Amino acid sequence: MAKGKETGGAVPAFNIVIIGQQGRLMYEALLFLASLRAVAPAFSGRVFVAVPQAGPRWREDPAIRDTDVLAMIADLGGTLLPFENRHFGQSYPHGNKIEALFALPAGEPFVFFDTDTLILDDPAQVPFDFDRPSASLKVEGTWPQLELYGPGYGAIWKSLYDRFGLDYAASLDLSQPDEYWRRYLYFNAGFFYYRCPQVFGQRFLDYALAIRDDRPAELVLQSLDPWLDQVALPLVIHALGGGRDALAPGYLDGQVSCHWRTLPLLYAREDDRAVAMLEQIAAPNRMKKLLKTWEPAKKMIYQEKGAKVRAMFDRNDLPRREQMIRNQIKAAGLWLR
């Protein structure tokens, strides 16, 4: 990709990166790549499948070793991007999305997607401003979890902004009530973007390590596993001049992408476009042969248990919290991960 090449309007060309790894993530990568190719065969950026390499931070080699999967990744337009885990790895695999950024080309805009995402329309139409980063607002108030006699949302978040010399007051959504979680900048790390992966990655790494290794006193009762990336992410975005309003709504986690999380959740709550895309790209014999070796796909797609999950829920009247949806699926014996 030539730096600065235009792809319609004022949005420059950009690279896409997802994480690939032996096991579940390699199958999710196939679905991501197949969906992108189906809706945007002429996408002009590079599509990197970032793969952690064997090393002291992994008990087993995490790299993709299935030769048929590797061949399919290449045929679908994915470029393998090996990277080394220097700080996370087995102990915190969510850290892959931080450390993979250092393997990307410096100075080229990027969009990171969680691998469990389907692309439903051409991502080149998304009006990214790569000077103002943002991330997914498809999020619940999962962190912090307040303790009875512990500090509140404000004190916890302010301690982090103060730790890194950031303007806490400017991060607040004053339309939301004090001590309600939506008042405080918080994202799902299912996607994020910026003009340079090296700059973003360094800030993300610095903040995540500082929070992990020397947390403010206000965080002493808080769990950081698996939330560390989502605790650091809003601080990174705020520090780099982005925010909750940096990306027009309705594109990502909407018309253009679907972060489905697990196949049972996809069938339970996502719209008909996402289900149709999943079943379309899973239908070719070559893809079917690979996906049938992954138990969730075998049962949800090919044995049509996903249809049973879908019949359990009204998409116009879903349970308020994701955990309630999960519990209903588990009670029916249809939960797979």
Image (tube, grey):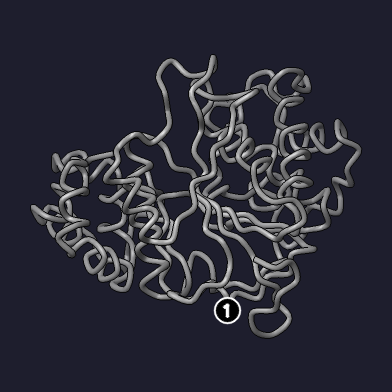
In percent of the image, x 69 and y 51: which residue is there? 105
Q: Where residue 136 sits in the image (x, y, percent)? A: 58, 56
Q: Is residue 254 visible?
A: yes
| View extreme (bottom): residue | 9
Asked if residue 7 lies left or right of residue 274, the reply is: right
Q: Is residue 148 visible?
A: no
Up/down of 76 relative to 125, above or below? above
For label 1, count other residues whose C-alpha is less than 10 Å away and answer few (under 14), some (14-19) or many (20+).
Answer: few
| View extreme (left): residue | 303
Asked if residue 217 lies left or right of residue 295, the reply is: right
Q: Where residue 18 sits in the image (x, y, percent)? A: 50, 49
Q: Where residue 53 sits in the image (x, y, percent)? A: 50, 29
* SS at mark 1 in the image: helix
Up/down of 311 relative to 6, above or below? above
In percent of the image, x 41 and y 71: which residue is there? 120
Up/down of 89 relative to 240, above or below? above
The quarter of the rendered structure image containing the N terminus is: bottom right
Asked if residue 129 lies left or right of residue 336, the reply is: right
Up/down of 166 relative to 111, above or below? above
- 165 or 58, nearer to the observer: 58
In percent of the image, x 42 and y 32: which residue is there? 63
In percent of the image, x 69 and y 79: which residue is there? 6
The quarter of the rendered structure image containing the C terminus is: top left
Q: Which residue is mark 1?
A: 125
The part of the image, by quadrant, that contains residue 206 is top right
